[in-house]
Amino acid sequence: MANTSLEKLIKSLNRGELKAFSLSIKNNKSTKYYRLFKQIKSSTKTNNESHTSNTQHRKYLYDTLLDSISKSSNSIDSNILKKLLNTETLFNKQLIKEAWKEVNKAQKLAQKHERFGFLIQILEWKKSIGFFLEDFTRQDHSNLSKLEEKVINQQLIFLQTKNLYMEILGLKKEIGYLPLNYDKSTFSKYEVNIAPEVESKRSIFYAQMTKSIYHWMLKDHQLEYELTKNIVNNIDIKVDRTEYLIGNLEHLTSCVCNASFDELLKTLSDLKTKYQEGYFGFDPSIDLRLFYYAANYEIMSFAFKGNATFLQQKIEEVEKDIQYWHKSLSKEMLIVIYSALKMGHYFLGNNKKSRMYINKMLTESNKSIRKDAFEDALLFNLIGAFDKDDIDFRENTLSSTIRYLKVNNMKESFEYKLSTALKKNINSNNIFSKTFSIIQLEFEKHFYRLPDGRLYSENYLPIYIWLIAKIKNKPILEIMKLWNTHKL
C-alpha cells in the first residue's frame, strides 16, 4: 500500500522537528497519538494497522505535526510571519505601542532579506497602527505610502525575474542545448539586466541565474562560468541560504562544462562543510541534494582527472550511501547516479559492474524520464561491445544502436556518426584508427575548445579518450590523465 500524506510527513521530519514534536505531544499526554506517531516512524514499510487507525486520530496527528513544524521553523519567512501574527494579536488587544515595536522588527527582517511581499503587508500594518499613535503625522503616512509604491515595484520586478528563471529551468530540462537555427527573438528575454535603482540583490541574483542557464543552452560555457562565479562570489549565505545553495549548485554545473574539476571539488567540499556546521538548518532534503550532486560530479571529476585511487574510493562510498538514500531518491536521481557509476566502473576496467548499471538504465521507462542518460547508456553499451571478442555480439549491438538512432531522427548526431563509422570498419584490423579518422570532424563539431586549447565535451569526452586508448592499447585512465595534464 502506498504511503499516505501522514506517513510521508513523518518520514520527512528532520532531527530538530522530531525532537520538538516528541516533546510537545508527550507534554500533552496524548498517548494514543504518540503511539500512532511512533508506530509509523519506526516502521520500515507501511502496514495495514497504521492505515486502519481511527481517521480522526490520523487527521489530528497530521494537523498537530504541521502546527509543530510551523512553530519550530526558523526560516526567514517563518520568522517574519510569526512577527506579523504577533503584531495582529497585539493590535487586536489594543496594545498599540507593543504592536508598533513588533511590526518594526518584522520590517527590519523583511528589508534585510528582501521579502517584498511581506514588506507590503508590514507597511499596511504600520499605517493602521500609526493611526492610533499620538506622534504619527500625516507626513509619516505619506512617507509610508511612497515607500509602499517603491516596494510594490520591487516586488513586481522580483516576480518577473524569478518567473523567467523558473521558465528557463523548465526549458533546459525539456530541450537541453538550443539548436543552431534557434529563434533568437524568442530567447532574447533571458538576457536579463536589472537596473541598479531597483535596489534588489535577489532580483539581480535570479537575473544572473537566468542568463547563466541561457548561456549553458547556447554552449557558451565560458560566459556561463563567469556569470556563476560572480553569483557565488557575491551572495551571502546569511542573507538567503536557499539562494546561496542553488547558486553554488549551478556553479558546479558550469565548472563541469569548463573542466574546472579542482574548483568543483572545492565548492562541493565547502557546501558539505556548511551543511555539517548547520548553515542550512540540517534539512535532510539539502543533505540528499548534496549527496546527489557529489555522487554524480565527484565520480566525473576523478574519472576525468584520471585519478584511479580517488575514483575507486568515491564509487565505493556512493554504492554504500545509495542504500541509505534509496527510498528518498527519485527515479530521475537514481538514473543520473547510475550513469556516473557506469562510467566510473568502466574507466576502472570493471566492465561487468559497468554493464550492470547500463542494463539498469536501458529500459523504456527510463528513456521517458531522462532521454539524455538513456542515450548515454546506449553509447557505453556500444563501446563495451568492443571489449569482447564476439564479432556477432558487436554487430548486433551496432545494428540495434543504429536502428534506435534512425527511429529517433538522430542521423546528424555524434552517436550516429560514431556507430556508422564503427560498422563500416568492423572487419578491419585498424578499426579504431580508421573510425577516429572518419569522425575527427565530428569531434570538432560536437566538442568545444577550452581556454587552454583542449577539445572538450562533458558528454563525449569519454568516447574520444576511449578511441585513443584503443588505438594506443593503453588503459583508459592512463590516457585520461594525459588529457587532464595537457600531455595528450
Image (spheres, rainbow, N blue to C red):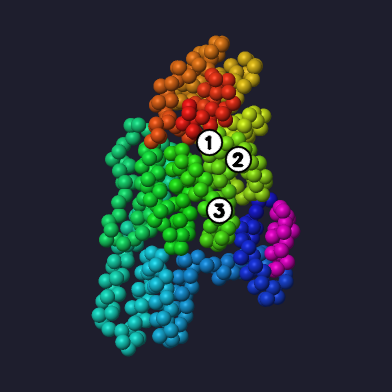
Is residue 290 among what the camera can see? Answer: yes
Q: Are marks 1 and 3 in contact (CB under 8 Å)?
A: no
- Residue at image mark 2: 310
**Residue at 64%, 57% in the rendered image:** 11
Does the magenta-highlighted stretch encompass residue 461?
no
Marker disc for residue 305 = 1
Does the magenta-highlighted stretch encompass residue 44?
yes
Amino acid type of the residue that numbered disc 3 sits on in the rendered structure: Lys
Q: Of label 2 and label 3, which has the lower sequence position?
A: 3
- Crowdedness near tag 1: few (<14), some (14–19) or many (≥20) residues, C-alpha within 10 Å: many
- Residue at image mark 3: 272
Q: Is residue 131 above or below residue 60?
A: below
Please tell me whether mark 2 sits on a helix, a strand or a loop.
helix
Amino acid type of the residue that numbered disc 2 sits on in the rendered structure: Phe
**Residue at 35%, 55% in the rendered image:** 204
Q: Of label 1 and label 2, which has the lower sequence position?
A: 1
Please tell me whether mark 3 sits on a helix, a strand or a loop.
helix
Q: Nearer the viewer, residue 157 or 458?
A: 458
Q: Is residue 149 above or below residue 479?
A: below
Please tell me whether mark 1 sits on a helix, a strand or a loop.
loop
Distance CA(mark 1)–CA(mark 2): 10 Å
**Image quadrant in which you'd find residue 159:** bottom left
Left or right: residue 204 versus residue 258 is left
Q: Which residues are magenta?
A: 33-54
